[in-house]
Each structure stands twice: as structure tokens, then as C-alpha cells.
Amino acid sequence: MPSLLRSPYAAVAAVAAAYLVVGFSIENQYYQLMITLMLLWTVMGLSWNTLSGYSGMISFGHASFWGLGAYTVTLALVKFDLTPWLGIPLGIAVGTLGALIIGYPTFRLRGHYFALAMLAYPLALLYIFEYLGYQEVPLPMKREQPVLYMQFASQRTYILLSVVLLVLAMLISLRVERSRFGLSLLAIKQNEPAAEAAGINSLRWKLLAIMLSGAFGSAAGGMYALVLLVVTPPTVFGVLVSAQALVLALFGGVGTLWGPVIGGAILVPLAETLHGELGHILPGIQGVVYGMAIILVILMAPEGLYWRVRDWLVASGRIQPRAALGIGADATLRPAQRITVTPAAAAETPNSNGQPLLEVRNLSRSFGGLQALQDIDFSIAAGRLQGVIGPNGSGKTTLFNVLNGFLRPNHGEILFKGGSLVGLKPNQVCRLGIGRTFQVVRTFPRMSVLQNAMVGAFVAARSDREAQGLAMDALDRVGLVERADVLAGVLTNKERRLMELARALASRPHLVLLDETLAGLSHHETNDLLEVLQKLNKQGLTIVIIEHTMHAMVRLADDFIVLDHGRKVTQGKPEQVTREPQVIEAYLGKRWMDRVEN
């Protein structure tokens, strides 16, 4: 297991060699067919994992791609005498296009609504193909030039072709897993709002994932039709097709290349062997095997066998956590190798024309009858450290959510460097130069600290290596370089807040919105974080911070904006604002004034 984690390409070669040795040493044609089916179902599991395993969008409808591939190859041969050597690539194209058509509207849904919507597509296709009269379509036997039509006398040839397909699917999956593609999907899976705020275009990455998933599934479905020589809607569009792909990935482990490979190697031969030996006594025993597999996984390894074993190896010290994480996990840069980064705010002087960096005019936002923000006006010059204070429920976090695109204002203007932000999505706002942290820290717990920061760096980097350099620079600026290889899920509260700040800095923003960054910190930890923020501000970074720790805010902020019940009460210097009667009455209280006077 450790060697697999350290040398994935060698492991792929070992898996291929093992299948070839077993497949070519078996004489029984039934078991040769079983090996072929095991390979194809493993590819189908990789198809499901490419979308659902990495992004977390659970699909009950991957039979759509399997069936489209099978029927494309079959009908191309039957109707147009097109060789499967061209029919399979055509099926891949059809499956990829079908995935795009399915994904674009369906990704607007979340959770079980998405899963149920995906289930509807293969069921609809099943009825469509039955209605069109394709209830049972046999592939014609070609006695002349059978090789041209992928009809071979020996089942071992199908095993060889299926191994080639599996290796291609594994190598592509490995490439996805170890690139910004996979890291972006994992970020979306673990915390989509944080990924969007870091500049990840979640819709784009999910569409690419489902298109690649559709290509895998269609290729496997096309080969499946050639192996069985007959296609029916229930066998390729049925619910059990989607369920089997899902079970293989869940059993082996989701979100990793090895999950479907493990699931396919264990469950498919077990189910098919029992079916061959006991199918006449217990019809449907294959379903029993997959049902028991799900029960065992839920009870003993909810994330799958791979993650269960991996976590045990990490806990026992046999492998380091970074060995199983992919991009950026094993490549911490030495100081001499790091990319030198000039803070964007200082480098480009965005207000050189005299305009404020950020302007808010008559901004309002309501939720039904509740007016969360009402006619808010303010402007912030570049290089300032602006505090936003007010009692709970005054609209502070709502203001941030409107500024960086999570909420759309009912009316009003938001101008950043002279351009409007209204109507932009969070990832678009980030790309313009606005970073964001959250009131409740949003981390990607199964990623390392470095990978968390890299998610933020992708918007400013042209390559993965440049993103890694930007991420290391951001970690250096907040003092977390030594923790770069640590899993984010084990960090302290202070370290998580610094890491979230580093993720925002890695995008090279001009402006950072910090939502209660000091919350939950001790006095000593608060001082440490204040020093970091003051240093960043001196480097030219504009900061807007929401905070309830008033003594820290008085030391930190250049100006205060005070909100109460969605309205701006006042704006000015801390020493001026904290003495205004309306601020004392609405927020600080008389005890604050007594302490100031004493």
C-alpha cells in the first residue's frame, strides 16, 4: 500500500500486468468473460468517481452514459455498417455531449435534488429507446474481416482491449487527481462557498468533470455491447447499472483513483462467481452481494476501504499524510526556490486616478419583510484598514456577502476600481482582486495547508507550479510555512484562521474582507494575528474587517463604519466613533464609556 501511494504510475502498470496475467492464464471462457466485465465495470466506477467522488455531487444516473455508448456503437454498426473502431470514439463524443446537456441545467440543484434529477435521465432514455423500437438489438456477426468489426475468436483479446481502456481511464484519473482540476473539485466537495470565494468557478469545473465522466462511461458501455453482442434498454439504462457503478466506488473509496479499482477487483468477481455457482438456486444473488457491500461499508468504513486503510497507515506512522494527497503534497519549496511575489495592491496602485478603491452607494438588501441593509453609503481608499462594527444582527456579514457576490443587492451600486460588482458571482469578484474569509472558518479539511492555499492561488497562476509558489509565499506572510504539509483538519483555531487568510492572500488581492478573524482566540493569539494584519496592511494591502473585540479594533483600524439594524450609523476615526452617544447606546454600552474615561 505505501508503495502504491508513492509510485502511482508503477501501481497502474502493476494493476494492468496483474489483470493480463490472470486473464491469459484462465482457460474457462465464463471466467474470461468475468474478467472482461470486471475491467469494464471498473472503468464505469472511475466514470462515477470522476464526477461524484471528487466533487461530492452524488449521481444516480450514470447509466445514461453507459447506455449512450452501447447504443451508439450498436446502431452505428447495424444501421451504417460503421466499424466499432470508429463507433467507440463516436460513442465517447455522444456521451460527452450528453453529459454537457445533462449537467448544465442539473447543476443548479443541490443535494438529494441533484441525485434524484440525475436518476430521471436514464429512465427517460430507457423509455425513449423502447418507444423507438430498440427493445433488443443484436450486433450482426461479420464473418468477413471480423477484426475490422472487433469480433474476435478469443475472449483474451477483449481482455487486452479492456485492460488498455482501464489503463487510459486510470492515467487520466490520476492526472485529474494530481492537478488543479482535481484539487478544485475536492475544494468544491468539501466547502463550495469557500471554493467560490477563493476564485474557483464551480460550475465550470463540474461541467468538465461530468463531460469527462460521460466519456469514460460511454467508452465502457460501447465495449460492453461488443462483448455481450446484444443491447436492450434495461441492461444499459436500468437503475442497477447506475447503482453498480456507485457501489464499486463507495466500497473501494470515493475521491481517489484506487477506490473503483479496489471495488471492481473485489465485488465484481465475487458477485459473478456466486451468480455462476448459485444463480440457479438464488436468483438475483448479485444484488445481494452489492447490498451487503453497502451495509458493510456504512458500518465499518463509511468513506471506503482505501481511506480506512490509508488513515490506519497514517495513524500508525507507516506513511506521512502528505503522501496520499496529490498536487502540492510532496513538493514544499525551499526558501531559495520560492517565487518572489510583489503584493498586488502595492504593485499596481489601483487608485492612481484619485478614485476610491471601493465605493458603496445606496446599497440595500432585504429578506422578505426584513431589511438587512438599507441605503448604505461609504468609500474606502487603497491601503486603508477599515473596521466594520455593530451589534449582532446589524447587517455586517450580509454586507460582506453582498460585496463579494453571495447575495445580490435589491438596489444600489458597488464599484471596485471604478467597475461595478453587482451581478457578479463570488469567483468573478475574487478574480477582480477581492479576497474573503468567513465568520466560521471554512477549510478543506482533507487537504494539506499548502493545498488549501493553492486553491486560492489558482486564479493568479498560469501553472500549478506557479500556484504552489504563490501559496508558499502566502503561507510565509502569515507564518505557516512550517505547517505546509499538515492536514488542515488537525490545525488549531488560530492556525485555521491564518490558513484561511493565506488562501485569500494567495490570489494576490487588492482588498481582503475579513469576517471576525479574531473570534475565539486568546489574548496572546489575538496579538499575534493583529501583528500579521498590521504587517500586511503596511505592505499595501487594503483590509476591511468585521470584529467584536473592540480593544483590538481600536488598535488596528484606521476608520470605523458602524452599522445598526441594517443602517450606517456613522463613520470616522476610532477615537471619534467610540465616543459618539448613538454608537455607545446602540453597541458599546455605558460600561465602555466608563472604562475609557477611567
Image (cartoon, rainbow, N blue to C red):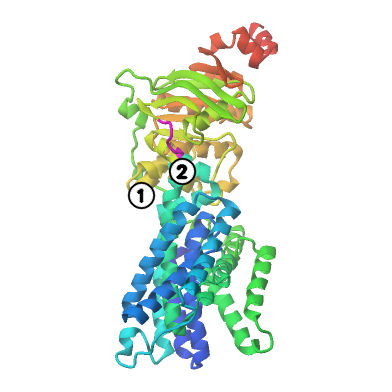
Q: Which residue is mark 2?
A: 453
Residue 467, compared with residue 512, is above or below; it is below
Spot occupied by residue 254 in the image (x, y as percentages of width and height): 55, 62
Residue type highlighted by circle 1: Arg
x then y, percent, for residue 460: 36, 41
Decide which of 26, 396 is in the foreground and name it. Answer: 396
Compare marks 2 and 1 and give the one earlier in the sequence: 2
Report crowding for label 2: few under 14, some 14 to 19, many 20 or more residues within 10 A (C-alpha): many
Query: What residue did someone put label 1 on?
Result: 465
Of 174 and 45, the residue lying toward us: 45
Q: Quadrant of residue 246?
A: bottom right
**Which labelled disc corresponds to residue 168?**
none
**Magenta span:** 421-426
- Residue 271 image position (x, y, % from top left): 60, 80
Q: Would residue 167 be seen by someone viewing this image from the given angle?
A: yes
**Separation of marks 2 and 1 at Cα, in angstroms:** 13 Å
**For the residue marked with disc 2, what is the amino acid?**
Ala
Residue at x 49% of width, y 33% of height:
408
